Image: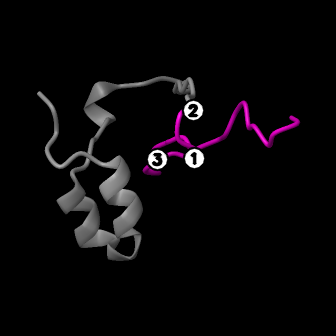
Amino acid sequence: MENGEVPQALVLKNSIFGSSVMEDDTFSLVGCMVSPGFEFQDFELFTQEDLLAKYPEYEDIIRKLAYEEIPE
């Protein structure tokens, strides 16, 4: 693609992922497809505190993308 867009990316199972735009005043459309299937019992959201305890070296990105508290 002419501006370095990536229309698809593979995220392996048991990975933590997030997304954001890199420039102000821009947008993106993000979706998530799972295969072969999805079970909510296997889904887990993490708070900033959870992630910082395990991955302190990624503090900047964790504070940018992760919830302080999980929304209800």
Instruction: Residue 31 in the image: state x and y as whole percent.
Output: 53, 24
Disc 2 + disc 1, Cβ < 8 Å: yes
Q: Residue at x 18, y 61 (%)?
A: 49
Q: Does the segment drawn in magenta span residue 11?
A: yes
Q: Secondary structure of the magenta portion, mostly?
A: loop
Q: Residue at x 32, y 35 (%)?
A: 43
The relative height of residue 71 versus residue 23 in the rendered view (above or below) is: above
Using the numbered discs, state the Cα–Cα distance from disc 1 to disc 3 in whole angstroms.
16 Å
Using the numbered discs, state the Cα–Cα distance from disc 2 to disc 1 in whole angstroms.
8 Å
Q: Amino acid at mark 3?
A: Phe
Could you tell me which secondary element the residue under label 2 belongs to? loop
User: Which residues fall within the magenta stretch?
Assistant: 1-25
Q: Amino acid at mark 1?
A: Met
Q: Nearer the viewer, residue 47 or 22?
A: 22
Q: Does the segment drawn in magenta span residue 5?
A: yes
According to the picture, the residue beneath numbered tag 3 turns out to be: 17
